[in-house]
Amino acid sequence: MSTDTQVQAAAEIGRARVRKEDTRLVTGQTTWTDNIQLPGMLHMAFARSPHAHARITRVDLSAARSMPGVVAAFSGADFAGEQGSLPCAWPVTEDTVVPDHPPMATDEVRYVGEAVACVVARNRYEAADAAAAIDVDYEPLPPVLDMRAALADDSPKVHDAGNKCFEWSLVNGDADAAFRDAPVVIERNYRQQRLIPTAMEPRAVVCAPSGDEFTIWSATQIPHIVRTMLALVTGISEQELRVIAPDVGGGFGSKLQVTAEEVLTLLAARKLHKPVKWTESRSEGNMAVHHGRDQWQRIRIAAERDGKLRGVSVDLLADMGAYLMIVTPGVPLLGAFMYGGIYKMDAYSFRCTGVFTTKMPTDAYRGAGRPEATFAIERVMDELAAELGMDPMELRQRNWIKHEEFPYTTSAGLTYDSGNYEAATARALEMFGYEELRKEQERRRANADQVQLGIGISTYTEMCGLAPSRILGSLRYAAGGWEHASVRMLATGKVEVVTGVSAHGQGHETAWSQIVADALGVPFEDIRILHGDTLVSPKGMDTYGSRSLTVGGVAVRRACDKVVEKAKVIASAMLEAPPEEIEFSGGTFRARGGSGASTTIQEIAFSAFHAHDLPDGVEPSLDADATFDPENFSYPHGTHLCATEVDTETGRVTIRSYVAVDDAGVVVNPLILEGQVHGGIAQGIGQALFEDAVYDDEGNLLTTTMADYLVPSAADLPSLATDYTQTPATSNPLGVKGIGEAGTIASTPAVVNSIVDALRPMGIRDITMPCTPQRVWRAIQAARGGNTGSAADNGSAADNGGDAR
């Protein structure tokens, strides 16, 4: 481990502990939502639209209702008076078009997979059979599939208000002056293909009524938000709703949602007075889980001949899909501030237009806006380096913010609090063997080898720890970004921690235990973390945007500090010394300069429990709550380097080596950090090489199964060489930064840059993702003068090639 600022690791923070939750998670000895079995429980299945756009003229439930095991069947009309509209919490402008979004369609469907009816039966198989028997008549309407064509005046309309959802812009500095008479201006158009999150655990919901109260188990990242939103959507009192997120098998943003299925399972349970369960199949999920990315990017960069940047301008088209889900319009804005990356420049401008199409809505997917921004700036930096005849790493080094310049206010208006790009990059170059690989690359080029070597660079930073409530409010986000925690000292000296963030694989139970062990001086094994249940943890803003540690973990630490202060008052009485003379370290209170008498925090916990001799006015409890709302985001950064071998005869791309050196501030648990980076890189490589949600010309999703939608397996990925530097954050007392999305943000441009670098001598300067062997081969053949179609073809008949506008 290398460090920028030497950090003295405490007893637990910085220790590579094996995760305490893994015993139950890895072996499956735990409760997933689909494991839940309740007396008299019924099962729900949905009939979904086979049309991308159509009017519903008739729904006949009679055949379904007569089938074995069926208890009830409902159409959208049956729920019309109570289902409300699914929420959008982030209308980014005053005039953002927010269409009604009924959980079950009543008169019109706007994407393939939209629910039009449902069946409740004794088991899931009978429910599925009966749902297939529902007879629906449709009057087909023209689909709207290409977001660029959707803005034309003669385009069919997704909604009566039109296909333009919003336009949002950001300008800092004089962008016109930055580009005017600039010696070098590069303009490129990049395609962010549509992705399907594909979490390990499909979504599932169970709702159990009890009188006027309802307990809902859901495979969700956001139990607190689901509870509040279900109350607002259905009109059921929030205090009558309990939402539990049991152990959840991955999310990546796909479970950052208030879903139609959650609403409809609740309404069906209320109608039938029985517990109801719904669990999606994988193919159903591919159609009905919100998708990610789906943007056209036009980026321009202006520079001097020596490589010094003058400005960046971005024009973005973002596909909203058919409706706005919980943060759909805000996703591009999370990247709006990051297209300048880690670089200094005089001016920056950004414009985004949100567009409705008749496809599954998009929303947050791992990184949410920041991977798209990092891809564009890191790709165009390579293009600028090629134009200038400069090594792409040298160009970056000439323009990035130096470590002594922090805190630094960027051209987009953000203040990066800390960083050391030089240290992370130096370590990455050392591990990668950059100079040796460049020499090998030159030899292969000189020898006209069939297999060419490419080197890709991604020097990234990200804006994460989604939190500052005032900033979120200024961006019209409907909620705050604070987080809550409670620490309870039990009579026997054990500790219970209640956290408002809800883990879905990140290792909170281990990391939070390490934070508490150091703060209170109690053994790691004596700490239990409670989360994911709105009755146990009534306050919280949940888990997304790499905010768990930087906001939730800091709230835990603040609650611990309050416990210590409470205990100090009792220790003062026990040790017969004024509170200001009491010192606390390693779980023990001592009177400074006194007799050497001491007592532990666990002994004080028992003293508070029996309360026989507490000082007057002191409550018999050490428990404490804390809420943390940081004043700034956190800004992890790093350097990722990728070497690929590209077979110029077949188009096959093989990742030969991959190095990642990340800086996430103070590291609580290196094993967890490494695991998060590995998983993130895998998803970024998936976008670069494998994944693409493809629709045909009628709006049918063609990639509905794992055979069609290619997710990389371990066999498809290289061994990853990782390390980290530590530059403590100044925005929180732990000095921590987020890491959950960093790998995904950094890896995609590193891989694509390496492929283009390998083929650049042939005149190839872009291949649209995913860079499949066929696309790479076609690009090579086109460069050689063959007639094989466009290298920019993204594989979708409905949306291929072309510029952003």
Image (cartoon, rainbow, N blue to C red):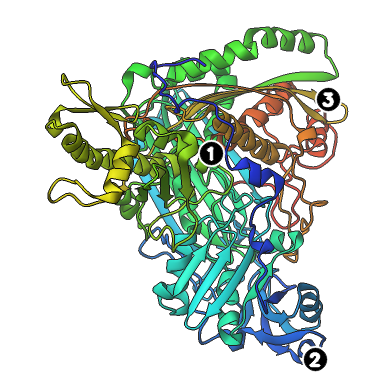
Q: Residue 570: image x %, image y %?
A: 21, 40
- Which disc is residue 66 wearing? 2
Q: Residue 773: image x %, image y %?
A: 82, 35
Q: Which structural element holds mark 1? A: loop
Which residue is located at x 73 percent, y 54 percent? 694
**Labels 1 & 3 near each other (Cβ < 8 A):** no
Q: Which structural element holds mark 2? A: loop
- Which disc is residue 740 wearing? 1
Name the residue that disc number 3 marks: 647
Which numbered disc, 3 or 2, marks the residue closer to the eye?
Answer: 2
Residue at mark 3 to residue at mark 2: CA–CA distance? 59 Å
Name the residue type under label 2.
Ser
Camera-side residue of 301 and 457 = 457
Name the residue type under label 3.
Asp
Name the residue type under label 1.
Gly
Which residue is located at x 23 percent, y 39 percent? 565
Residue at mark 1 to residue at mark 2: CA–CA distance? 49 Å
Q: Is residue 64 visible?
A: yes
